Every structure is written in structure tokens, then in C-alpha cells.
Amino acid sequence: MSRKTLFIVLGLVVLIAAAGIGWSMGLFGGSSDAASAKGYELVPTDRTMGNPKSPVVLIEYAAPSCPVCAAFNVQAFPQIKAKYIDTGKIFYVFRVFPLRPDDGEAEKIARCLPEDKYFSFIDLLFKNQPKWDVEYGVQAPEGVHEGLVLLGRIAGMSREQVDQCMVNKAEDDRINKVSADGEARYSITGTPTFILNGVSVGSGNIPYDTLSKLLDTELAKQH
């Protein structure tokens, strides 16, 4: 190798090393630092509604088998959706935080559907918990499985498709990562838990008026 070639190679090594350091420090793109500053990080696999450019982001961690989540879905969420999500005031992110394996199975079926059918299936799961949820006396695993197959078929899938979705190990890994991240970032222990612009604002069936005031306050701060 010639001396000139050697210097070129060494120069490239230095540039690559510097780039690596810069990336790790967030100098190129700054995605890690930006996420840390905001207190949350959005990922391409998130299921969302509303305005992605809104400065106000509401993340809900919920479990499909959670009766309290189902109550929030029926009582407060429709009003939140109408006033804040559908009007583009906020960006809403829904993440499954499984309380038991059944929640993972339900989420995997939901993820098999076209993305624009995801939320309608989550709503179907919430409103039909007595058909598949052990908290309503459904026997596991057979009763739970049959109940989920029934709901999958209502959504337009075959039994074979539902079964195939439920054994997707890659989805298991993603679900577990979402759960672990929620625990690490926000110390989540129950559902539903709500994260407003990176800050936990409470858990449980939060009344519409309470959540509305929190959203209005955050919106006022951003303008």
C-alpha cells in the first residue's frame, strides 16, 4: 500500500469514527435528544388518530381485556375524539399494554387487519369483552380463543387467518417492547394510563371534563 493510499484509508477511518461519535451524541438528526426533550418517542408502528403536526400528543396505554379501558372507550373517548382528535387539535396515539397473554393475542389479531380497520376492531374488543375476557368468567384458554376467533370473523377474517395471526412471534417482540418502554419511561402499572406531551397525567377511567381541561391547558401553553 502506498503512503498516499495509507493516508486516504486513515482519513476515512477517522471520518467514520467521528460520524459514529456524532450519531451517538445526537449531532446528526438529534432524534434521541429530541425524544428525550419531548418525553416521548413516536414510532412507525404506532396506531394513531388526528393531526400528526399538532404540538399536543396524547398517548393512551390500554389493554383490550381491561374493563376500565372499555368504560373509558364508551364514556369519555367519543367526546375527546369529536372535540380534539377529529378537529385536528391533538395527535392521539394508542398503545397496547398487556395485562395478560390474552391482550397480546387480541392485539395481534388487530394488527393483522388493514391499518384503517385497527381502531374499529379495538372498539369491537372493548364492547364485547363478555365474549372473550376471563374477567367476565370466560374460561381460558379455550373460551378466550373461541371468543377472539368469533370477533375476528366479525371483522372479516377466517378462523385460519385468526389462528395464524395469533402465533406471530415478531408481533410478540414488538408488543413486549412497547410494554417495557412504557414501564421504563412512565412507570406504568395499570391501564388505561395517559401520557400528555411526555408526562403521565393519570390512570383509570378519567372523566371527560377532567381530561378536557388537561388538554385545553396544554393547548394554551403551545400557542
Image: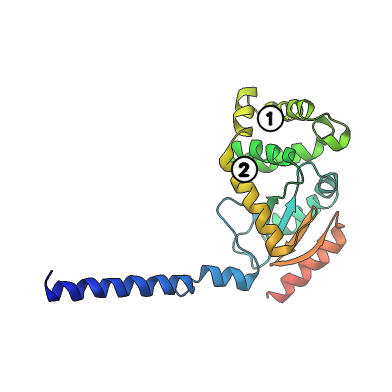
When asked about the image quadrant of residue 200, the answer is bottom right
Residue 152: image tag: 1
Q: In terms of secondary structure, where does tag 1 sit?
A: helix
Against 140, residue 82 (above or below) is below
User: Disc 1 vs disc 2: which is toward the camera?
Assistant: 2
Q: Residue at x 48, y 74 (%)?
A: 25
Q: Earlier in the sequence, mark 1 or mark 2?
A: 1
Whether residue 48 is visible, yes or no, is: no
Residue 172: image tag: 2
Against 180, residue 216 (above or below) is below
Q: Quadrant of the C terminus?
A: bottom right
Expressed as whole percent of the image width and height from the top left, the position of residue 198 reads 69, 67
Q: In terms of secondary structure, where does tag 2 sit?
A: helix
Q: Residue at x 79, y 53 (%)?
A: 192
Q: Residue at x 65, y 49 (%)?
A: 176
When asked about the image quadrant of residue 33, the answer is bottom right
